[in-house]
Amino acid sequence: MNIKLKLARIEKNLSQQELAELVQASRQTIGLIEKGQYNPSLALCLKIAQSLDKTLDQLFWEEKDD
Amino acid sequence: MNIKLKLARIEKNLSQQELAELVQASRQTIGLIEKGQYNPSLALCLKIAQSLDKTLDQLFWEEKDD
DNA sequence: CCATAATGTAAATTATATTTGTCATTATGA
DNA sequence: TCATAATGACAAATATAATTTACATTATGG
């Protein structure tokens, strides 16, 4: 569950459909990325981050201990 | 051409082959990503960043003006 | 020169991200 | 109640990332 992405989208007052159109993807793809258990391409991540005025790290980076 | 990735790899004294093994990818995949014109998956980007002690932004983020 | 490590490149194949379509659910408003 | 927007979920088809295999180039060291 990518809560950071979902929150960033809602902050921008965008529906999944609207974000999908901004990044030229399908609504389902956005839904799946927010749901997690999903592995989007770097290009799509970059478009999403730019559309939401965030960086890759802000949306997709998790601190790891190992 | 992803020069940041290439430099980060060389800083770590890793060959493409060695980095590939660390992230469980093929040597060719690493070479193609460094060459650019390529669209890796987020999961692979995360593994690469962790292996090189960098974040996503440090390796894959470009400031955009638009 | 010969051997080898490191890298670049290309074609064929496999794996999987993404799309498309469809139906169900929830919430909101007329 | 009825209509609709938003979302979740699922399956099948398509697009493309990634692998595999192979051969070439460059550099280094014997």
Image (cartoon, coloured by chain):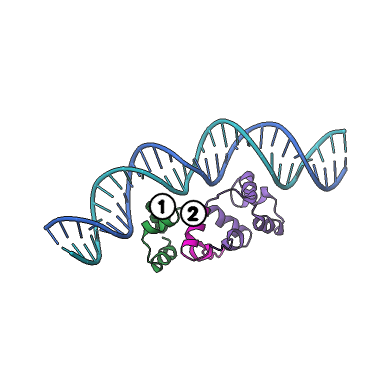
Chain colours: A green, B purple, C cyan, D blue
Q: Does residue C16 appear left or right of residue A28 in this picture?
A: right
Residue at label 2?
A44
Instruction: Locate residue B1, reporting x and y percent.
Output: 65, 52
Q: Does residue D13 appear left or right of residue B31 in this picture?
A: left
Residue at 52% of width from left, 51% of height from top?
Answer: B41
Crowd around label 1: few <14 · some 14–19 · many ≥20 (10 Å): some
Residue at 63% of width from left, 48% of height from top?
Answer: B30
Return the chain for callout 1: A
Instruction: Locate residue B20, reporting x and y percent.
Output: 63, 49
Instruction: Specify the quadrant that holds the N terminus of chain A.
Output: bottom left
Asked whether the beta carbons under mark 1 and mark 2 sit within 8 Å of each other, the answer is: yes
Q: Which residue range is magenta in the image?
A: A43-66
Crowd around label 2: few <14 · some 14–19 · many ≥20 (10 Å): some
Residue A49 belongs to the span the image colors magenta: yes
Residue toward you, B51 or A24:
A24
How far apart are labels 1 and 2 at the CA level? 10 Å
Residue at label 1?
A29
Instruction: Locate residue D14, reporting x and y percent.
Output: 43, 38
At label 1, which amino acid type do we have?
A: Thr
Secondary structure at numbered mark 2: helix
